[in-house]
Amino acid sequence: MEFSLESQNPQLVTADCIVVGVYEDGELTSSAQQLNSASQGFLAKLVDEGDIEGKTGQTLLLHQVEGITAKRVLMVGCGKKDELTTSQYRKITHAALKFLNGSASQSVLICLTELDVPNMGSHRKTRQIAEAGHYVQYRFDHTKAEKLPPAHPLKTITIHQAESTSSSAQQALHEGNAIGLGVNLARELGNLPGNICTPTYLARQAAQIASDYKNIKATILEQKDMEKLAMGSFLSVAKGSREAPKLIMLEYTGADKNEPPHVLIGKGITFDSGGISIKPGQAMDEMKFDMCGAASVLGTMKTIAELQPKLNVVAIVPSCENLPDGNANKPGDVVTSMSGQTIEILNTDAEGRLILCDALTYSEKFKPASVIDVATLTGACVVALGKHPAGLLGNNDELIDDIKQAANTSCDRVWQLPLWEDYQEQLKSNFADIANIGGPGAGTITAACFLSRFAKKLKWAHLDIAGVAWESGNNKGATGRPVALLSQYLLDRCK
Ligand code: BES
Ligand code: MN
Ligand code: ZN
């Protein structure tokens, strides 16, 4: 798929389809008005006749409109003009491109950067369209015997600009393209089943990124390396599985090598059965998505490798399976983490924190500027926040604010939960320094409290992506979140 920019009068553009907007009160966007005049009021007439109401994401395809060079016009509903938000804008662009992908139109001109969205300049809108282009085109067929390409995939997406093409718009395209690629890599890794996407598979994917791009190096630590490092907590989870655990690292060097890196840590449980504290069968297949934190971190590294920003970034992915086995962790077992703190494992299903804590301790060696861990950590997060924002917690207000800002810019939302000292007592153990669960209340917060014990020397934040990493139901599949957020956070660090 190719992207380009165009600022010509839309009625004169040769394309298979031109996309223009209509608001809920029937008002046409400026490009739609131009097409309307060129076609002697044809678009307004359709609105008057009730063919399209302008509800967000509604579509109406017109063929061979007189006075217009392009073969088709797609009218897309933009909702209420004064209620436009960034997430609304996302829905509009996705709806239009989703409609067109697989339709007869292969080259499209999108006239949607002209929508007036608060806090969204033309750079962000241009980028959003490029991201949406990648998003709608992704299809999972790795494990389908029949690999039919869609009859008519979108080939070129031209984004209409109000002013003549600026370097900022070019940069926006470049960013949107890179983020789209990173998001789709994260989706693909997330969607792959646990019998294919093993820790070894993830390690190979990381090595692939390192060989595809410059300034990026992969290092894989094996079980024996981790034994030497005394990662007793991580390895205790891994020993219930026959798959070899991996600690996967990618180091991107875009600035002076002495500059402290930003570290991203991704939970890479390639299947979470719960272990001996086994999960109920209902929707257990979805626990193949328990490596979506890892996938988002690897996806972000791909985006960064594409964009080559002037900063240093390290990705750390602890990866293993959580299975019941004669050698698996048992409730009541006590293990010693790399930090030296002992942990009483009261529930083997709270395994994410057991692998992340050693990765956090390991990250100290990079003397990082910041550390963000990303994990499908708690079902409680889905209960508390649903599927729209990721849960955000951390030990540093500046870092939290930077992440919130990146979330707003990238339209990849987060919501902060409190990490008050008061919650720490829920993790008291009679037999170890800390218990791995904190009882029924505030499960997302006590999980973060657990991690905070291992992040004392770090400027650290935690993203619980249990609600946002994948969709269930008919659209079951990984979303690639929060690649856009992490990429934005990193890009913001260069300025
Ligand atoms: N991977 C799960 C969290 C999860 C569950 C994410 C469902 C998305 C949907 C995690 O390892 C887990 O099992 N957490 C437990 C923690 C509990 C035992 C304290 C949970 O949330 O039930
Ligand atoms: Mn679990
Ligand atoms: Zn898990």
Image (cartoon, rainbow, N blue to C red):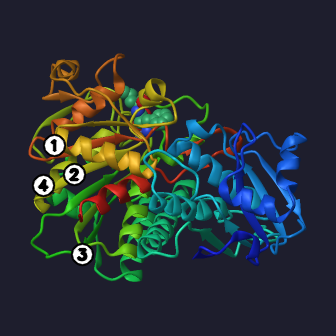
CA gap, disc 3 and disc 4: 20 Å
Classed neighbour count for the residue bearing mark 4: other residues with Cα under 10 Å, few (<14), some (14–19), many (≥20): some
Q: Amino acid at mark 1?
A: Ala
Q: Which mark is residue 371?
A: 2
Label 3 or label 4, whichever lies nearer to me, is 3
- Residue 389 visible in rendering: yes
| Residue that carries the numbered disc 3 in the rendered image | 254
Q: Which mark is residue 455?
A: 1
Contact, mark 3 vs mark 2 (Cβ under 8 Å): no
Ligand 1 location (quadrant): top left
* Local secondary structure at mark 3: loop
Label 3 or label 2, whichever lies nearer to me, is 3
Mark 3 or mark 1, earlier in chain: 3
CA gap, disc 3 and disc 2: 17 Å
Label 3 or label 1, whichever lies nearer to me, is 3
Residue 481 position, x and y percent, is: 47, 50
